[in-house]
Amino acid sequence: MFRRIMTAIVGILILIPFLVFSNDWPLILMTSVIGVLAVFEILRCTGLVKQIHLTVISLATVLFAQIATRILTVDRYLTVALIVYMVYAVISMTFSVFSKGKIQLSDLCQSAMIIVYVSFGLSCLTLLRDFSEEYGLVLFLLAFFVPWVCDAMAYFVGVFFGKHKMIPDVSPKKTVEGAVGGIVGVVLATVIFGLVMHFGFGKQPNYFLLIALALIGGLVSQWGDLIASLLKREYGIKDYGKVFPGHGGVMDRFDSLFSVSIFIFAACKLFEQVTLFVSW
């Protein structure tokens, strides 16, 4: 537990400069590095990393998506991303057709799906940062805040109070008590965040919206974690990598972040006229 906590602290300290200067190119550098490492871990997990041509195309896709996010408008990016991801999927499947059985279609489909999911999840971080001049930073930080608080609370509640296994075939250590603790913890933490914004920065929060984002975001966060765990069980590995001692690889640490960033961005686009905070 001590190693896990220390790794989390060091990781947050390393991320701070990228978060502070997230309105410029350091954010693209951060998402590109995370994306490349995550995609490499996925390809290694499925055994496709040995296919150099496929690896190069996969890494190029995630890099292009991160750069395009910052230089294009939201609507143009979504159109370009759809085309790029469709082309990537078609090219990937073509490799299976001409591989003469060396590349299994099931491995290719799973890899392509997760790689698109990772790439778009990271792009949504930048889209959230650029979403609003006034609240873009808040939305961006919420995408980190919700999954990491949920994960931390679920871990500690599960360690000390967990008795009932949730889905042992997918994630043996996750418990019902831990899942509930994660949801309750992130909702309470988000309310406290709203109070800090209220009394510390003179912003009147829309508590209903904040709580809804935290509640659904917590559920989405745990769903994202389970999807990543399901892929690990499918290929019989414990962790995606060893980048973060006590946590595993990049996919082990950021799996929930990808799903939550997509959810928050989708919610912001759907309810674009709803105000998160009101200035006094």
Image (tube, grey):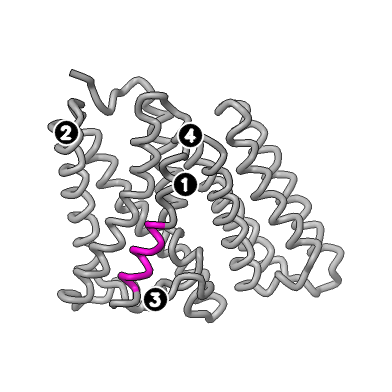
**N-term-proximal mark, 1 vs 2:** 1
From the image, state whether disc 2 or disc 3 is nearer to you. Answer: 2
**N-term-proximal mark, 2 vs 3:** 2
Q: What residue range appears in magenta?
A: 4-13
Cα–Cα span, label 3 and label 4: 31 Å
> Considering depth in this image, is 271 or 135 the residue closer to the camera?
135
Residue 48 belongs to magenta span: no
Circle 3/circle 4 CB separation < 8 Å: no
From the image, state whether disc 1 or disc 3 is nearer to you. Answer: 1
Q: Position of residue 27 (x, y in %)?
A: 52, 43
Residue 12 belongs to magenta span: yes
| Drawn side of residue 259 relative to residue 119, left or right | left
Q: Secondary structure at mark 4?
A: loop
- Residue at (50% x, 38% y) in the render: 126
Cα–Cα span, label 2 and label 3: 35 Å
Cα–Cα span, label 1 and label 2: 24 Å
Circle 2/circle 3 CB separation < 8 Å: no
Cα–Cα span, label 4 and label 1: 9 Å
